[in-house]
Amino acid sequence: RTMTTHTGYTAIPTEAKVVTNAPGESKAGGSGHRDGVLSQLPKELSQYLVFPDPKAHLRLSSQASWLDHICCCLCLPYALFCKMVLVRQGQIGLTWNGDEPRIIGPGRHYLMSPTHSLFAIRDISDPVIIHGPLKIIRVRVGELGFGIDTENGNPVLLTAGKHVIASPTFKFNSMLDLTLRTNELGVMKLVRVETGCVGYAYKRGELVILQPGIHVIVPPDRFGSILSTQQQTLTLPEGVHESSDYVPLKIRADVFYRIVNPKRALTNIRNVENQIRETAVSTLAGIIRSSTLNEIANSSKVTYSKPEDSKAGGEEPSAPPFFKHVHDQFLAELHDHMLNDWGIELHNIRIESLKINDARLAQDISKQAVQVSQQEAKYRMLQKQAEVIQVEANNKKTQTLKEMEAKTECIRSKADADAAAKLKEAEANNTIILRRAEAEAKALVERAKAEKEAKELLGQGEAKYAESLAKTALGSDLAKLRVQAEMMSGLNQVAYVPHLPQILKQTAFTSPLADPLADGKGK
């Protein structure tokens, strides 16, 4: 028997067994919760799930009776020095009373029976506590506890929570990390396939592709492995191959590929990587054997390797012609064959290093390459100098053009100003002339009006005068004499011709003024 100072635990029936429940139900038959882990598990595992039983609890030693106190007093030296056990808070003691496992809680205990001994003291927060047939297992969220019921051989999957199991036929194995790709469930296997990958297994001897998700493989079915369907890089081993003119070349390259038809690849190829590696190496060797050293040396480089800083975002140099030739021919020979026959798409080949394996020949070609590089550098320098001269000439030409344009603009501005001034002056002169002409025209009109009025007055006066003269014979003669006087005005000398009157009489005159004797009065 055990005497303890206090206890805070109730009992668990010693005849408790492991019970398998339907998903979502606990041992007590109540409805439990479904977390994200359980919803992702395959249906085949539903029958093996065990949920925590809220009614299950620990049985601890009870308070000591009066008989225990009397026995303790009689055996005080033995109890104090040999059979006293102190269990601290947060711990439990594991003891054996004969062949019966017991658990004692926090406090000071005296083990009175000679067959009652302490086995171990464990923290109550330990995830797994095993004491004979009694198991206390705490499963965290996102995990599953895995054990086997040895009575029937079935696996037992413990869901999240605290499980108290008292069964000699239950054997706890481990906690399952469901983030791993595979977990062993005894002879069964739990497989996790993520996006970008596929798994494959053999069910009844037939190849089956496992899509992303969680799968369970039960014998006699067999799980194979997991293949990536993303682009992969395969580094080819560095090898030495001879060119068509028997020059040894050492080459190192990488092949980029992607599995697009896993079933076809697994059906036709035993080992995908080995098959791709061997095929790529043999194809690359064939391309090298069909090329001459002159074709390889066209790039003016003895070796070629990808610069380290190209991965840091710098611009990658364009591949030499031979590397482009290798790339194109390699893809032309293998791409369709691998895709149609193996279900593998070949994306690219990248040559990491290519150099002559003969040191002496490499040194000679290096010297030639150095000379070519020096000539190229000299050519570039001369080209740069010519470009500098051209730029300076263009700058000078541009400056001269700008100066000429400035002078032309100045002359044009001055000419425009002079023209504007002359135009204003001409406009002013035109205005003056127009005003003067208008004044003269007005004066002429006024003068004409005055002359007209004067003539009209003169004509009226002459008419009245002629009318007054016409009334007398003397007035008629005076009028004739006036006409003759007007005709004679402006003459400096007058000659007298005696026979002129006779001549004038015989001459026909058209003008009435020229024939004064036409009316017969002059005879």
Image (cartoon, helix red, strand yellow):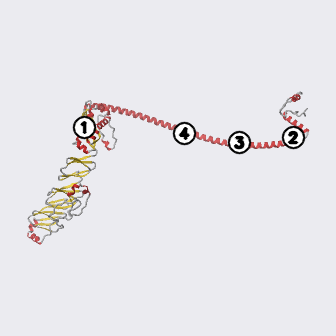
Asked whether disc 4 touches disc 2, contact meaning CB atoms under 8 Å apart, the reply is no
The amino acid marked with disc number 4 is Glu
Q: Is label 3 in contact with label 2 (beta carbons under 8 Å)?
A: no
Residue that badge 3 annotates:
437
Amino acid type at image mark 3: Ala
User: Where in the figure is residue 357, as x and y percent of width and height?
Assistant: 25, 33
Decide if residue 350 is in sight here.
no
Question: For the point 81% across and 43% down, which residue is it?
Answer: 456
Q: Which residue is mark 1?
A: 281
Which residue corresponds to mark 4?
A: 409
Instruction: Give the residue type that dot 1 points to.
Output: Val
Q: Does label 1 or label 4 sit earlier along the sequence?
A: 1
Look at the image and tell me in which quarter the C terminus lies.
top right
Q: Residue at x 63, y 42 (%)?
A: 424
Front disc: 3 or 1: 1
Residue that carries the numbered disc 2 in the rendered image: 466
N-term-proximal mark, 3 vs 4: 4
Chain-order first, disc 4 or disc 2:
4
On the image, the x and y values in percent for residue 399 come to 48, 37
* Disc nearer the start of the sequence (1/2): 1
Task: Name which residue type carries label 2.
Answer: Ala
Q: Disc 2 on helix, strand or loop?
A: helix
- Residue at 47% over, 36% down: 396
Estimate how packed mark 4 is, as few (under 14), some (14 to 19) or many (20 or more) residues with alpha carbons within 10 Å: few
Q: Name the mark nearer the viewer: 3 or 4.
A: 3
Q: Residues within 10 Å of mark 1 (few under 14, many from 20)?
A: some
